[in-house]
Each structure stands twice: as C-alpha cells, then as structure tokens.
Image (cartoon, rainbow, N blue to C red):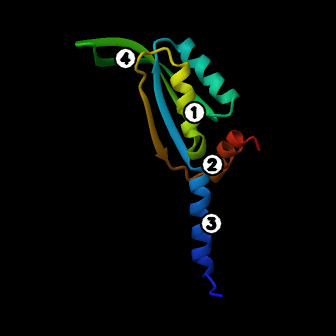
Amino acid sequence: MTRVPKRIASFTRVNLLSKLTGTVAVLTTFDTEAKARKVARSLVRDRLAACGTIFPAAHSVYGWKRKVVEAQESVLLLKTTDLAQRALTQRLMKLHPYEAPEILVWSVRSDDPDYSDWLAGWISGR
C-alpha cells in the first residue's frame, strides 16, 4: 500500500471539504426593501441561506421592453454553500415577484474558518 505524504493528504482533505461546503454568493434585486426582507427571512429560516444582506437604496439603470428604465431597488446578497445553491436559486425563482429576476451566482473564498464553519453549520442544521 502506497502512503500519501501528510502534506498531500491534508491538501486533498481541505479541497474536499471546500468542495462540500464552499461559500457561494447569490445576488438579486427587489423593487422594495420589504420584499427583499421577506424573501431573505424565508430563505434563512429554511436554511437555504445562512445570511441575507440587504442594500436598500440602489439605483438601477437597465434595458427593459425596448426602453431604458431607471428604478430604485433593494439589493439582496445571500450567502450559502455549493450544495444548497441550486435549491436556493430554484426557491428564489418561485418567490421572486419580477418577470425576469436578476439572479447572479458566484463562488467566493473566505479565509476565516470560523465564518465558513458557521455558514456550513447553519445550512446543514448542525
């Protein structure tokens, strides 16, 4: 049996844990802060997100139905895990009042193991 050097075994274990509990950020917008808050509470309560941060006063400029539109919106930034991301975005699509909601997803890195443990723990129910 071939022994794996400790350094490589540790690296592999960390990568596996990172894959299982990697942090994902999901960004969306709402026309009111109240709607953003309601959706954030629902997703955190159901452990699809560990946290939802609301930026209540964004000014958006976008193209919609052949016009340039400007609107006040609230930005909701959700933090979740790789494993929960698909369920979160599917639920978000159902809860969202917009016809074509902006839902942006990206992997992020946290160098704080306590934060990563808290996030993964909340989502997994630990």
Question: What is the CA distance from the residue labelled 1 to the residue labelled 4?
Answer: 25 Å
Question: In 3D space, how far apart are the residues under numbered discs 2 and 1 (Cα atoms)?
Answer: 18 Å
The vertical placement of 113 against 4, above or below, is: above
Q: Which residue is mark 2?
A: 116
Give the class, few, some or many, for how many residues have Cα within 10 Å of label 3's Cα (few <14, many ≥20): few
Numbered tag placed on residue 13 in the rendering: 3
**Residue at 27%, 13% in the rendered image:** 65
Name the amino acid type tagged 2.
Ser
* Residue 1 quadrant: bottom right
Amino acid at the residue labelled 4: His
Q: Quadrant of the C terminus?
A: top right
Q: Residues within 10 Å of mark 4 (few under 14, many from 20)?
A: few
Query: Could you tell me which residue is drawn at 62 percent across and 66 percent down?
Result: 13
Residue 59 circle label: 4
Task: Measure the C-alpha gap from mark 2 to mark 3.
Answer: 15 Å
* x, y percent for residue 15: 56, 62
Disc 1/disc 3 C-alpha distance (Å): 26 Å
